[in-house]
Image (tube, rainbow, N blue to C red):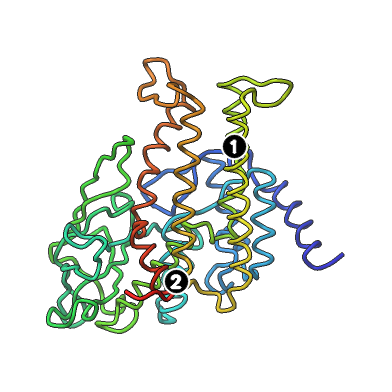
Amino acid sequence: MSELKEFRADVAEWLAENCPEGARGPGQIPNGSTQISLEPDVAVWLERCAEKGWTVPIWPTQYGGGGLSPAFAKILYEEMAVIKARSPLMGMSTSMIGPTLLEYGTDEQKQRHLPKIARGEIQWCQGYSEPNAGSDLAALSTKAVDHGDHFLINGQKIWTSGAATADWMFILVRTDPDAPKHEGISFMLLTMDQPGVTTKPIKLISGSSPFCETFFDDAVAQKDDLVGELNKGWTVGKRLLQFERSGIGGLTGGARAANPSPGIVRIAKQYLGEDQGKIDDPSVRRKILNLNMQRSAFQLTAQRANEENKSGTPGAATSIFKLVGATMQQDTAELKRELMGFRGLGAHEEVGFDGNELKATEEWLHLRTTTIYGGSNEIQSNIIAKRVLGLPE
């Protein structure tokens, strides 16, 4: 038996014995927040995976990771999918700031922050966009002023995902107001639980409030929480965006996010009927077939891109996967809603819509944001044109 086959067998056995029933199928996934209570099975699953280093399987073991190669990590994700095990941990901590600290953080910063992330003990949020600096992020004006052993931060961020429950924030701030806008920016870390930070949730059309306005009034960031060089934060900030787009685009975890969706078939049979085990309407069968072929092709392409990426870090090509992956998520939600007919437009439980129907509506509305956050489709198209295809401006 090859080493990979032996590992697969060991993983399958461990998962069967250690993944609680309450951590399989749809349900709660921890993001590390100290303000959110975990369901018992979810807490057990997080603890067991953290002990193995499998919350962040490819991170080095000295920071709480599993030390797995991409090939071994891919097997882990595949075997988790077999038993419908949910991820033990997700969010900006593992997908964005963690990888960025691994690349740009000091040894002290890595030792202080990464093990807590790996154990699911801390939630991070992103302080990038501002009311007048969204797609033109380098136009940000939130400033940080040097006060000896710390910086004082004043300004405002918006669309701050998870800020209401986050413990820490990574933030881009202006530290040299006289420099050109892409220079004079620094990348810092700061605690959210301090008098100088105020958050106000923004209610979305989906009914949820994952985004916030965040205000800084002499908020404190310690000097040893400056990541990278002073006034050179644009480089760090861009790299973090590449990690973010890798996750949105399905590159994280070997592209496991884009596999065929059996839920679509179940919904079609439930709402449109079936004939001898097949979806009754041939035009619907064709739509589902096309979608699942696209998802499978996307998954295989992302897998190949991961295998061919010798550097191990994301590059400009992540914009391709972000652009296509975000659009595909919207297409999937749109087809689900279409198959349900008017039942896919449920807004209130009291008028007869069940939980799955309400969830489908919320998902359809929420996924309108995927082609905006993390850099809009227009921004990704510009990056692809300039940095991937080398087209003239």
- The tag on residue 264 is none
Amino acid type at image mark 1: Ile
Q: Left or right: 11 with respect to 390?
A: right
Quadrant of residue 61 within the rendered picture: bottom right
Circle 2: is it few (<14), some (14-19), or many (20+) Cα within 10 Å?
Answer: some
Quadrant of residue 155 within the rendered picture: bottom left
Q: Are marks 2 and 1 in contact (CB under 8 Å)?
A: no
Q: Position of residue 87 (x, y in %)?
A: 56, 51
Label 2 element class: loop
Q: Position of residue 241 (x, y in %)?
A: 38, 66
- Choose the circle earlier in sequence order: 2 or 1: 1
Residue bearing the label numbered 2: 316
Is 370 or 82 nearer to us in this picture?
370
Q: Position of residue 69 (x, y in %)?
A: 65, 70
Q: Left or right: 146 with respect to 388?
A: left
Which residue: 41% across, 78% down?
A: 105
Label 1 element class: helix
Which residue: 45% across, 58% down?
A: 322
Q: Left or right: 21 with respect to 223?
A: right
- The tag on residue 288 is 1
Is 274 or 217 nearer to us in this picture?
274
Seen in the picture, residue 73 relative to 162 is either above or below; the reply is below
In what quadrant of the picture does the C terminus appear?
Answer: bottom left
Real-space Cα separation, disc 2 to disc 1, in angstroms? 31 Å
